[in-house]
């Protein structure tokens, strides 16, 4: 059996684009290290940003020498590493299309959940509701056509399912009733969170608190502000 490469996922102090890769790695049993940007680079983000591929995170560092940027590319690499990519190229392209549709939800959803407060939060929350409902409708229609299991490709999840899970669970936290007309999408979220390795990860990950008022992550029992800096 080929030895798994050494994996390091580098991101910031927020719940956003590093979640789906971690869900996939937890599900597939891939070992990895997670590092905040200042831990990995040993320097403040503004100083290292110009030298980072595309000047943004997350990145996945493989065997301490190869850097994979862009969250969708990271998910595709991990999907292949875990042996989850469909052999049929049409099915693989379909799952990639679902992944890209989910990633389109990143903005404004993730920044709003992690950083917006007060009236700014409420305005953005309401403004994005039509987009969120439209995405839910798209995913629901695709799932209705799937009779082999709760996920987009059947009985087992893959990269697109984890991306959808992350973004839709964030949307559901913002709008608790958003899935009331989308039972198959609700079933996908429930099926994902009931996987034992995923359940353990969800219970152990830093809790995002104060959404809309004072966003913080609870790291090692200590609430700290979300953001790009250590403090």
Image (cartoon, rainbow, N blue to C red):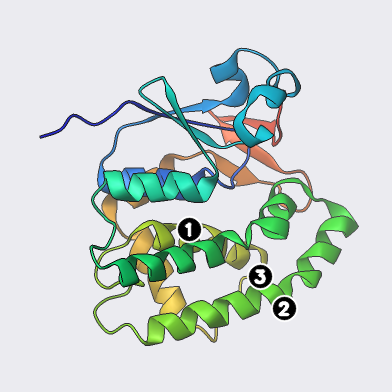
Q: Nearer the viewer, mark 2 or mark 3?
A: 2
Is 202 located above or below residue 62 in the figure?
Answer: below
Is 196 located above or below residue 154 in the figure?
Answer: above
Q: Position of residue 209 (x, y in %)?
A: 65, 46
- Screen quadrant of the N terminus: top left
Is 44 on the left-hand or right-hand side of 35? right
- Mark 1: few/some/many CA within 10 Å (<14, 14-19, 20+): many
Which residue is tagged 2? 130
Which residue is tagged 3? 175
Q: Position of residue 169 (x, y in %)?
A: 54, 62
**In the image shown, does 209 or 14 lie closer to the viewer?**
14
Q: Position of residue 150 (x, y in %)?
A: 32, 74
Is 223 on the left-hand or right-hand side of 194? right
Q: Nearer the viewer, mark 1 or mark 3?
A: 1
- Mark 3: few/some/many CA within 10 Å (<14, 14-19, 20+): some
Dot 1 or dot 2, earlier in sequence: 2
């Amino acid at each position: 059996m080929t030895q798994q490469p050494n994996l390091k996922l580098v991101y910031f102090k927020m719940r956003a684009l590093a979640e789906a890769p971690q869900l996939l790695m937890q599900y597939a049993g891939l070992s990895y290290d997670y590092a905040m940007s200042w831990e990995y680079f040993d320097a403040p983000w503004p100083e290292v940003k110009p030298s980072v591929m595309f000047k943004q995170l997350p990145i996945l560092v493989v065997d301490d020498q190869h850097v994979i940027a862009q969250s969708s590319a990271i998910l595709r690499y991990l999907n292949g590493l875990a042996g989850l990519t469909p052999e049929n190229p049409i099915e693989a392209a379909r799952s990639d299309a679902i992944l890209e549709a989910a990633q389109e939800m990143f903005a404004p959803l993730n920044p709003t959940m992690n950083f917006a407060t007060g009236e700014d939060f409420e305005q953005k929350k309401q403004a994005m509701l039509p987009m969120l409902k439209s995405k839910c409708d798209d995913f629901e229609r695709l799932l209705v056509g799937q009779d082999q299991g709760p996920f987009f490709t059947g009985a087992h999840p893959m990269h697109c399912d984890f991306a959808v899970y992350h973004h839709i669970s964030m949307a559901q936290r913002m709008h608790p009733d958003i899935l009331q007309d989308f039972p198959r999408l609700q079933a996908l979220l429930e099926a994902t969170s009931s996987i034992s390795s995923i359940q353990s990860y969800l219970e152990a990950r830093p809790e995002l608190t104060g959404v809309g008022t004072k966003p913080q992550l609870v790291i090692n029992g200590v609430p700290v502000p979300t953001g790009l800096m250590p403090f």
